[in-house]
Image (tube, grey):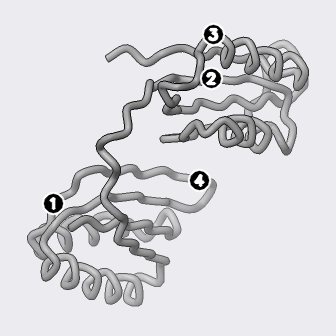
Amino acid sequence: MQITITALGNIQSNFIAEILPAIRDCKCAILEIRLSRLAQSTAAYLLVQGNWNQVAKLENTLDSIQKRLEIKIHTFRPEQKDKGKECIPYSLETISLDRCNVTESITSFLFDRDIEIEEISGSCYQAPYIQTSVFSTKFIILIPPQLPLLSLREEFLEFCDHSNIDAILEPIKR
């Protein structure tokens, strides 16, 4: 059985130092972990596995950690992923002038074509040589095999030209 854990707290709380031993003590195993700092907050994302009893014990332990450290912890038991689905993994990187709807436009384009998003990361920074903010994103996407790649690439580049976005769409090499 798997459980996803999302934890959010301030930088000083160092909550990950409490969560990791709790996972070990409940005899669960970490399958994936990510930790990021955003402004004065720290966010952690974990995928943990154990039998139903171990996972239930971990959920109770996380609840007490949440109350004691005054952080936010959310847990979710995901459904097992469909292993029969074969998709082509692609990397998608974009750079554009800092606009509020760039990421929203790109995700809408992808979802309208039944393309799954595995991961998104992005940040805004001051471009060198000019006094303008630039927004950069990186997506990991899964393209269904029935989608014609050549026409998708052309359609996406046309979308980017129309939206004033510079983009690179390329397969992830295994």
Q: Secondary structure at mark 1?
A: strand
What residue type is disc 4 on? Leu
In the rendered image, residue 153, in percent from the top left (x then y), is placed at 67, 14
Q: Residue 29 got which mark?
A: 1
Q: Secondary structure at mark 3?
A: helix
Separation of disc 2 and disc 3 at Cα?
18 Å
- Residue at x 60% of width, y 60% of height: 40
What residue type is disc 2 on? Glu
Separation of disc 2 and disc 1 at Cα?
32 Å
In the rendered image, residue 111, in percent from the top left (x then y), is placed at 66, 42
Residue indicated by mark 3? 150
Seen in the picture, residue 119 relative to 2 is either above or below; the reply is above
Q: Secondary structure at mark 2?
A: strand
In the rendered image, residue 22, in percent from the top left (x then y), is placed at 20, 74
Q: Residue 38 got which mark?
A: 4
Q: Secondary structure at mark 4?
A: strand
Dot 1 crowding, Cα within 10 Å, few <14, some 14–19, many 20+: some
Dot 3 crowding, Cα within 10 Å, few <14, some 14–19, many 20+: few
Separation of disc 2 and disc 4 at Cα?
21 Å
Quadrant (top left/top right/bottom left/bottom right) for the N terminus: bottom left
Separation of disc 4 and disc 1 at Cα?
26 Å
